[in-house]
Image (cartoon, grey):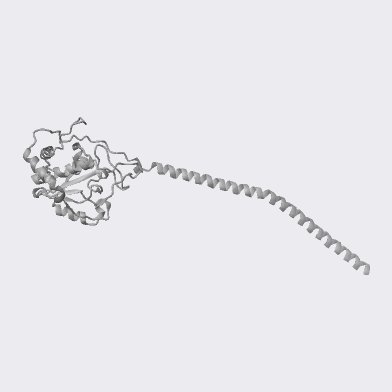
Amino acid sequence: MASDYLTTLIMSIRSKTKRFLIIIIFSISGLIIFTRYTKNSIPDDQSKLNQSLQSRLERLVQVSEEDNQKSNDLPSTSQQKPPRALSWSSPLSKQCSDIDQGLKKRLNHRQQQLATERNYVVIDSSNYGKRYRWDLYGRRVDPTPSVVILHETTDSYQSALYAFKDYHRKDEDQVSYHTLITLDGQIIDVVDPLNRAYGAGNSAFLGEWVVTNPRFKGSVNNFALHLSLETPWDGRNGYLNHSGYSDKQYDSLALVLADWMDRFNIPPENITTHQHVDLAGERSDPRSFDWSNLQRRLAAIGYLCVSSNPSD
């Protein structure tokens, strides 16, 4: 009986030992397999990670190239070219003789008093600005006034001054001239000639303009002087013509032009009209302007007799 129990106990121990050994063997085998798999999988995972990063970098480069291409395809204001030059044949011609002596005497006398006759009116600073030495694209430009643009008010000079004195937040509403001349010949200076008046948007003279605002096309404002004549009563109806400007206005006009021509070395042929420089074809001012009246006056004070010989 005792021997049977002992035999059974020994058999049980052997069985448990065998199972324990089997468990250990399987555990060791599993550990070996796991270790090998881990060693093999780490490079694979690293490789997959590298491939993923490379793929993302390539995609970023592709997106960047696509964005650059789209940017290049967009219309750029930097590609704006000055408009085709419209020829300008000045109605003013050289004149050294046949001078009206009475007119000459009158204008010379008034020219001596001009500084005390001129009035200056302060307007809102939103309606004028500085002259730029660089355009919107970083190109150097000459801000020296080199052309005179003639205008008319289309209403009373008081209405024009009211508009100039008002604050205008929007760029497209800002407007001014350098000088106004009333029907009775009064000279009203509004903007210093060294500053830029907003007298002509979307404009050019002999193919030249300067772009200073990214929202608008170029204009002559950066190198122009703007002078406006008060419109006579019968011209405040929008018709194409009216009775014309007074002799006093032409007298004052000639004297102001002579002053600017001296100060900025502006030749007579660079005196033009708003109608000519307007690229939209919407302006007709100054209507009913008599160039012969201006011719006689400028000739009388010696501004149309220009010698081609520098020694003269």
Image position, residue 16 (x, y; %): 83, 62
Residue 144 quadrant: top left
**In the drawing, does residue 274 fall left or right of residue 41?**
left
In the displayed structure, would residue 5 be above or below residue 257?
below
Could you say which is closer to the camera, residue 266 or residue 38?
266
Image quadrant occupied by the C terminus: top left
Q: Can residue 241 be seen in this snapshot?
A: no
Image quadrant occupied by the N terminus: bottom right
Image position, residue 125 (x, y; %): 25, 54
Residue 275 quadrant: top left
Image position, residue 204 (x, y; %): 25, 40
Q: Can residue 224 be seen in this snapshot?
A: yes
Question: Going by the picture, which residue comes out furthest to the front?
Answer: 311
Q: Residue at left 75%, top 52%?
A: 32
Question: Going by the picture, which residue comes out furthest to the left?
Answer: 102
Q: How many marks?
A: 0
Could you say which is closer to the camera, residue 276 or residue 25?
276
Residue 217 quadrant: top left
Question: Going by the picture, which residue comes out furthest to the top?
Answer: 309
Could you say which is closer to the camera, residue 18 or residue 28?
28
